[in-house]
Amino acid sequence: MGLILVRYGEIGLKGRNRNVFVRRLRLNIKDCLKRNHLAGEVSVHGQRLYVETDAVEAALPHLQRVFGIVSLSPVRSAPLDMEAITAEALAVARSAGLGPGRTFRMEARRAYKGFPLTSPQINAQVGEAVRVATGAGVDLSDAADVTIGVEIRREEALIFAAAHPGPGGLPLNSQGRVVALISGGIDSPVAAWVMMKRGCGVAPLHFTQSEVETAKALENCQVLDRYAYGWRIKPLVVSHHEVMAPIVERLHDLRAERWTCLFCKHAMLRRAARLAEEIGAHAIVTGENVGQVASQTLPSLEMISLGIAKPILRPLIGYDKVDIMALARAIGTFDVSTRESQGCPFLPPSVVTRPAMDKWLELREQLADVLP
């Protein structure tokens, strides 16, 4: 059986609650293996988790999508003997392509203090053997081409070189659940992913206005589900027409069509708050970003948020659009979100750009019986 060393980051700062987060991470890793039909065992040793599996290479890309994991390293084991440790370190160095013209550094960690050599002594002895055997240079900085790690445990030594990055964050489903408004656009799936990284189980809510946009939203929910180890992404689809038609009709009667987009956002938030109450979610998540469109100016955000019964989380509120698009590409939602789009059928010829609070309150009172 092969062995993968799992490192976590922020979890290590949780003090007395750390074991709760480690247990959740362990369960999510087990779910990852199960959902991808991979046999394996997950164990905890001190501040490390280990995955034992005979499908190391197959498991790595899936484990890289488990929130809470900072990095992963396939490891070789050796008896607690310097000759055996050095031999495995040389094998790891060669498999990492170490040779003349490349650099390396050693990072030994002596978790078992009964081992006779200290970490610096292990670094010096093994490092010298690797330097002589490979002809590689030594670079003690982060710029080294290869970092060879040696971890001394009570039972054995573990040796590794490659470190595959994970998404970091907190284990999914460790922070409760949220309702996430998901459209067919770029921002909202990214916002949902960011909250998943913070440990929140996401319940997507989509207001369908066309087959084109709904197909994109649901496909992006499938992308998000690839990261949802320890949780299941189950989108709820609600008719946008049923929600908005009475509101648009009333605004038309009041000759206030320019307010349509603001009342659309407000109505969706109200419906999301009802769903959150029904499923025991603590907050609503949106992909809104300050100043990106007229309905996302600070005055507009203030108005549409008034009276919403649940906290509204806007994780992308200060992001640049370029940063949002880069993250969408990294997580795999960008190509779906940028496919052919179909505009909102209720979009008015012009929208209010400098909304006044007193007018908003007046209109909201006049629309009270048609708001969801």
Image: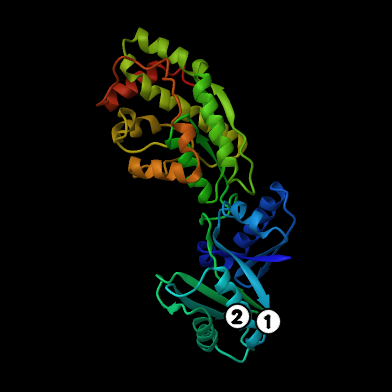
Q: How is the image coloured?
A: rainbow
Is residue 361 found left or right of 309 in the rendered image? left
Estimate the x, y position of residue 189 in percent, counting from the top left. 48, 38
Marks 2 and 1 close (CB-CB < 8 Å): yes
| Mark 1: few/some/many CA within 10 Å (<14, 14-19, 20+) | some
Estimate the spatial distance between the alpha carbons at disc 2 and disc 1, rounded to whole Å: 8 Å
Q: Residue at x 37, y 13 (%)?
A: 251
- Say which residue label 2 marks: 111
Percent of width and height locating residue 353 = 26, 25
Residue at 29% across, 17% down: 350
Q: Which residue is mark 1?
A: 154
Q: Amino acid at mark 1?
A: Arg
Q: Is residue 311 visible?
A: no
**Which quadrant: the N terminus?**
bottom right
Q: From what the image shows, is residue 302 above or below residue 11?
A: above
Q: Secondary structure at mark 2?
A: loop
Q: Mark 1 or mark 2, which is nearer the start of the sequence?
A: 2
The image quarter containing residue 249 is: top left
Instruction: Give me the residue at 54% from left, 55% from top.
Output: 170
Residue 363 numbered tag: none
Amino acid found under the numbered disc labelled 2: Ala
Q: Mark 2, residues whose alpha carbon is within 10 Å: few (<14), some, or many (≥20)?
A: some
Query: In this rendering, is residue 199 above or below 262?
Result: below
Q: Is residue 15 left or right of residue 337?
A: right
